[in-house]
Amino acid sequence: MASAPLSEFELIERIRSQVTHNPGIVLGIGDDCAILSPTPQCSLVTTDMLLDGRHFILAECGPEAVGEKAMGVNLSDIAAMAGKPIAAFVSIGLPRQSADTTALGILKGLRKVAERFNVELAGGDTNVWDGPLAINVTLIGETVPPGPVHRSGAQAGDGIFVTGPLGGSILGRHLHPKPRIAESLQLRACMNLHSMIDLSDGLASDLRHILAASGNLGAILFDDAIPIHDDAWILASRDGRSALEHALCDGEDFELCFTAPRKEIENLVLPDSSNWHPVLVGEIQAEPGLRSKQANGQIEPLTLQGFDHMIASKQFDDAL
Ligand SMILES: [Mg+2]
């Protein structure tokens, strides 16, 4: 016998009984507004909307992965500012024919990631409609001393670093982001970060955001230093584009790209438990424009672009 559909109230009660509590929340789910306790630090607020057929394919990945991705991409933005996450507000448009199972699956995915990062699900909204699944997460965080890291602080001479291998996330990693919150806080605590961004659109695009925000600076990337993910090699063997091109352009790696004086990295001592180290991939230069230094030493303008959510919708379909 089919079970009766969940009412909105029952769904909210189910969520409320399962949330992780964060001390920054005075009042979470269940009233007209959530109440956050004031903090001596600045608040960070970020929001990201994901759509079925655009950022995931529900029929293929299932609702739990959607919840994981929706929470993970927002946490990645908090990491990009060197912040600490506190609370998430989730709004969902559920497809009518599978509203209950989709909602509960998404909740499972959201909770899985929220618990890992001590984020409280503190509010939101659910609606059922005849359209495809749409989910929006707004995440609140706070800065940590000595303050947030902006995109706009890069300086000529800075080293450009990334926190992990890039490319090929469309093979599945894009659904299970590993937000670099801990790595970001470690870096913030022990070195002078000049600028930072998370790699959602690909290094070739996201680095340009840093350059533009920092006063139209330029940069050179060292081709043979870019850490290339195994998935990029797999994709390259299928589509004829190089693995390096995938590493520079694919996007949704959710690693961090940051710039800092090179000597800061030489003095960087990470805890013994850390299983990562920043990788130097290039240098900020005063001359505008993005260039690449190829393995043979030749320097060429880098014309490759990363993912653009407004104009490259077909890229997602083609890659699957
Ligand atoms: Mg971002």
Image (cartoon, grey):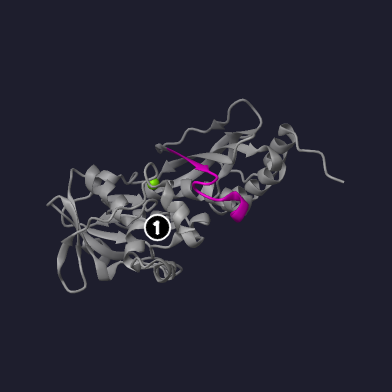
Foreground pick, 263 / 221? 221
In the current view of this chain or complex, which residue is farthest to the bottom? 296
Q: Residue at x 26, y 49 (%)?
A: 208
Q: What kind of element bears circle 1?
A: loop
The segment highlighted magenta reads 45-61
Q: Which residue is mark 1?
A: 255
* Relative horizontal placement of residue 88, taking residue 79 as reference (left or right): right
Amino acid carrying label 1: it is Glu
Q: Compared to 110, does 10 lie above or below?
A: above
Q: Residue at x 22, y 48 (%)?
A: 211
Q: How many marks?
A: 1
Is residue 296 in view from this perspective?
yes
Q: Position of residue 155 (x, y in %)?
A: 18, 51
- Verify whether residue 59 appears in magenta: yes
In the current view of this chain or complex, which residue is farthest to the top? 32
Foreground pick, 278 / 23? 278
* Relative horizontal placement of residue 163, taking residue 53 as reference (left or right): left
Q: Residue at x 68, y 39 (%)?
A: 16
* Relative horizontal placement of residue 193, taking residue 133 as reference (left or right): left
- Determine the image quadrant of residue 250: bottom left
Q: Residues within 10 Å of mark 1 (few under 14, many from 20)?
A: many
